[in-house]
Amino acid sequence: MLHVNSSIGSVENAFARDVVGGLSADVKTLRSRWLYDERGSALFEEITRQDEYYLTRAETSILRERQSDIADFVESGAILIEYGAGAGLKTELVLAGLRDPRGYVPIDIADTFLAETSKRIASRFPSLWVRPIERNFLDVFEVPFDCFGGGRTGFFPGSTMGNLNTIEAKTLLTQMGRHLGDDGRAIIGVDLQKNVDMLLRAYDDSAGVTAAFNLNLLERINTELGGDFRLNQFKHVARWNEIDKAVEMHLVSLCDQRVTLCGRTFHFGTSETIHTESSRKYTAESFERLARSGGWRVAEAWRDADGLFGLFGLVR
Ligand code: AVI
């Protein structure tokens, strides 16, 4: 339980600041990064195993089927730098296919994930240098290369790019360019635009795991910020935003109600929503435009057999 003072001016904690700021706005928003506390991360893992959530299966099938094409693209002796490494399960598939990879640099804010992933990969690939960096990949930071000599390839799978807004996505691509250098390469996984029903089902599965994942954010606020959200008075909803080409997750208030946290009271009208996440969906063209805005060019585009998901190989 995190203790915060009752006035926002004295709130030292980024989570509290974000929550109070987001709920004070005309259109209430909570940033999706806060979905991932311990329970949220476990629920996300469960989402990836739901029938309706095709993204993980589709991307994994590309990594398996295109292993040698990916190895050709990366070239031998490479250093793989993974942005938001998480459990690093897809990384193993990539590393297993590469010719003589020299180093692996996982970047992640979650220190437990980072330590476990680094240890597992180091023992599975004993000749590889493993140098974890504990950072939020959206922060500005340097990647130390003193002990490496190979070409650098960035790896950003899982459609996490889709959770970033346009400015964050462009900033990350620009930062990747700085980390990876003029000869650097990048492999980025993004979900592709498709039938809206299929998209919405992926974000509102029949077992209710995505709903639990979304509502867990209110539970987290109650636990960590002393909030009094009544979870049964909010409902998870997935919506398609045609302008942003994104599936949005919302929490809809089921009645007119007040919620208190951090010494502030927030009013929710019936049907008023809190926007908690956007998952942008791309076409080959819209992804190419995004890549160019961050200083990259698409050199390779791989898809799964059903054309649901795209893995793009970028060069400078
Ligand atoms: C982590 N990220 C790519 C997931 C997505 O598909 O946008 C998060 C998620 N939200 C609901 N389901 C999955």
Image: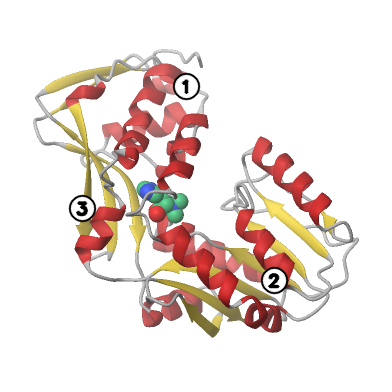
Q: Amino acid at mark 1?
A: Val
- Closest to the camera, between mark 3 and mark 1, is 3
Q: Tell me the tag on residue 153.
A: 2
Near mark 2 (Cα within 10 A), the count class, few <14, some 14-19 or many ≥20, is many
Q: Is residue 159 visible?
A: no
Residue 75, percent across and down?
Answer: 75, 81
Query: What residue is drawn where x is 84% and y is 67%?
Result: 102
Mark 1 / mark 2, whichever is N-terminal? 1
Residue 193, percent across and down?
Answer: 31, 71
Q: Secondary structure at mark 1?
A: loop
Q: CA distance from mark 2 to mark 3?
A: 35 Å
Circles 3, 1 touching at the beta carbon (< 8 Å): no
Near mark 3 (Cα within 10 A), the count class, few <14, some 14-19 or many ≥20, is some
Q: Nearer the viewer, residue 23 or 236?
A: 236
Of all residues, the one furthest to the bottom in this rendering is 299
Residue 187, percent across and down?
Answer: 59, 72
Q: Nearer the viewer, residue 248 or 171?
A: 248
Q: Nearer the viewer, residue 169 or 191?
A: 191
Residue 111, percent across and down?
Answer: 67, 37
Give the residue number, with chain letter if any, for mark 3. 239
Q: Secondary structure at mark 2?
A: strand
Q: Quadrant of the C terminus?
A: bottom right
Left or right of 250 on screen, residue 7 = right
Give the residue number, with chain letter if any, for mark 1. 11
Query: What residue is drawn where x is 47% and y is 30%?
Result: 39
Query: What residue is drawn where x is 24% and y is 19%?
Result: 230
Q: Nearer the viewer, residue 38 or 252?
A: 38
Q: Is residue 293 visible?
A: yes
- Establish if 50 lies above or below 103: above
